[in-house]
Image (cartoon, grey):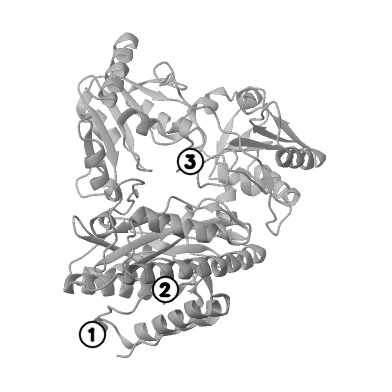
Amino acid sequence: MNKFQERIETLRSMMRARGWDAVIVTGSDPHQSEYPALRWKQVEWLTGFTGEAGDVVVTLDHAGLWTDSRYFIQAVTQLEGTEVKLHKTRVPGQVLIPEWLSLTFGSRQDAVIAVDSLCQSCEAVRSMKEVFSVAAVPDLLDPMWNDRPGIPQTPVFRLRSGEERSDKIAWLREMASENGCGAILLSALDDVAWTLNVRASDIEYNPLVISYLLVGQDYVKWFVTKGETEDPVTASTFEALASEGIEILPYADVAIALGELEDDLAADPSSLNYELYSAVRCNVVEMASPVRLRKATKNEFEVDGMREAHVRDGVAVEKFLYWLEKSIEGGRRVTEWDAAVKLGKLRSGTDGYLGDSFETISAYGPGAALPHYITPKTDAPVLEPHGLYLCDSGAHYLCGTTDITRTIPLGDCTPLEVRDYTLVLKGHIDLAMARFPEGTPGCRIDALSRAPLWNAGLDFGHGTGHGVGFVLGVHEGPQDIRQNLNGTPMMENMITSDEPGIYREGQFGIRHENLLLCVAAGRTEFGRFLRFEPLTLCHFDTSILDTSLLEKREVDWLNDYNARVFETLSPMLSEAEALWLGEKCKPVQL
C-alpha cells in the first residue's frame, strides 16, 4: 500500500467515525483560486495528482478524480497504484460529481456528504444541500495532515496601475450602494490585489496576497496575515495603506467582522467560501464581482505596460530560441529541463522581471502531447535533431504579464508533423485576423481557430483563449474564447490568448500561442466592430510549413507579423542573433 492509499484509508476511518458517506476534496482554496498555495493543495496531497484542475470524491468503497482532457494522460500516470479512478469531464456523456453522487446514493435522503467549508464556495454547497445532508467542516483534512504547510507570507509591495486605489475604492462603494448594500466583500485574491494596487508572491507564479477586503461606506478593512517581524517592503506598503484610512487586520478576523455587520453585504457567491457565508448574520446580496470585468478591460497605462512587457519578453525568448537552435546544431546535449532553465535565466536578467507567470512547459516529442506537461528535473528527455519541441512559458514584469507558446522544428519532421503544425498555425492566424461586431462573446468566434482542424477531422480539448491579468493571474476572466457558452462579450482593451493545438498521444504535441489585444476596428452602417492586435513578439518558424494548406491572406498576415517581430526586436539582439532572426523572418512565398 503506497502513501496515497494509506491516506485515503485514514480518511475513510475518519468517515466511519463521523458517519460520513462521502467526502469531496477540491483543488481550490478559501478564495476559490485556480492555483492554490501549498497549504491548500489537498488533491495533490491525498492522491498524488498535480494538475491544476481536479476534484476528488472518496466514499467507503470508491475514490475518484474528476478532471478534463488537458490532464487525462497525466492523471492515468499519476493515479496508478492509488486506487483512485479517473472520471473524465468536458467529454460527451460526462457524469459530473453531483450527478454521480445522486446515482451512487439514489434516493437515500440520509446520505451525508462532507466538504471542506473553507474550500467550497457557498454557491456549490447550497446546491449540494438541496439533495444531500452536508457536513461542512473547515480544514477537513487537518486531523490527518500532520505536516501541513501554513499560510504563506511574502513581501507585499505597491504597484503602479494607472489608477489610484482611492478611486477604485470609491467606485466599489458606488457599486455596493447601487445594489442597496452598506458594504462589499472581495474574496477573490486578484480582485483584492487589483483594488489595492498591491502584489506579493503568496502563491507560486501568482503575484497575489492571501487576504480579504471589506469595503464599507465609511471604512475599508483589509484582512491579511502579518508576521511578528515585517520586512521593510511590507512595512512600507502597510504604512502607506494605513495613511489612506485602510485598516489592516489579521486574516483570521474576517469571519468575526462579517458576523458583526448589520447592513446588507454584497458578495460574489462563486468566490465566497461557505464557512464565511455561514458567519454572516446580515442579508447577503449575491452579485458577480464588479472587479472582474473592470480589471479585464485594461486602462491605457496597463495596455502600454503590457506592450513593453512583450518587447522585453520577446527579446528573451528570441535569445533562447537562437541558443537552442545553435546548441542542437552543434551536437550539444540539451534536455527538456536544461532548456527550461536556460529560458528562465534569460528572462531573469530582464529589467523589471518579477518571476515566471506559470511553470514552464518544456516538452519534446511525446511529452508535448500532454497540454499541461510537467518537465522533469531529473532524467528529462533529451532534445534530438528531429521532430518538434514545444515550449509554453511566461513571466511577470513590473510593467505586465506574458504567456507564449512556440512549437519549434528541431530538424526533419514527418509529413504528419508538418501537416498538423501548419493546420494549427492556420487556426491561430484565422482567429488573430478576426473582425467581429461589438458585443460578440468569445464562444462565438472560437470556431474560427478550430475550423481548419475540424475540416481535417481534428480537434483539441482545451479552450482557445483565456484572459490575462496586468501583473496578476495569467488566467483571468470573465471573458474567454472556448466552446463553453459564456455570454461575456469581447471588449476593447481586453487581453486574451490565442492558442489552438493538436495532441497525438505518444507522438507529439503542437500549440501556437500569442496574446491578443482587442481593439477598435471601425464603424459601419451595421454598427461598431472590433479586431485583435498581437501583443506577443516572437517569430513563428516557417521552415516546415505546407503552404498548400494556407490561403494568401493567411500568408500575408504571417509575413507581416514576422516582419514586425524582426523590426521591433532585432535592434536589441546581438549581431549574430539579429542575422539569425532575419533569416527566420523572411517572407513565405506561396
CB atoms of marks 1 and 2 within 8 Å: no
Q: Is residue 416 left or right of residue 101?
A: left
Alpha carbon distance from label 3 to label 1: 44 Å
Q: Is residue 400 left or right of residue 132?
A: right
Q: Is residue 564 left or right of residue 327?
A: right
Q: Amino acid at mark 1?
A: Ser
In the rendered image, the quadrant that contains the C terminus is bottom left
In the image, 206 versus 212, the foreground residue is 206
CB atoms of marks 3 and 1 within 8 Å: no
Residue occupying the point 41% across, 56% down: 340
What numbered label is drawn on residue 548? 1
Residue occupying the point 51% across, 69% down: 314
The furthest residue to the right: 243
In the image, 86 versus 295, the foreground residue is 86
Mark 2 highlights which residue? 432
Q: Helix, strand or loop at disc 2? A: helix
What numbered label is drawn on residue 256? none
Q: Amino acid at mark 2?
A: Ala
The furthest residue to the top: 17
As drawn, 4 above or below 394: above
In the image, 486 versus 309, the foreground residue is 309
What numbered label is drawn on residue 33? 3
Q: Helix, strand or loop at disc 1? A: helix
**Residue 91 rendering spot, x and y as whole percentages:** 23, 49
In the image, 279 versus 304, the foreground residue is 304
**Residue 5 rendering spot, x and y as whole percentages:** 25, 24
Q: How many residues crowd around disc 2 within 10 Å: few (fewer than 14), some, or many (20 or more)?
A: many
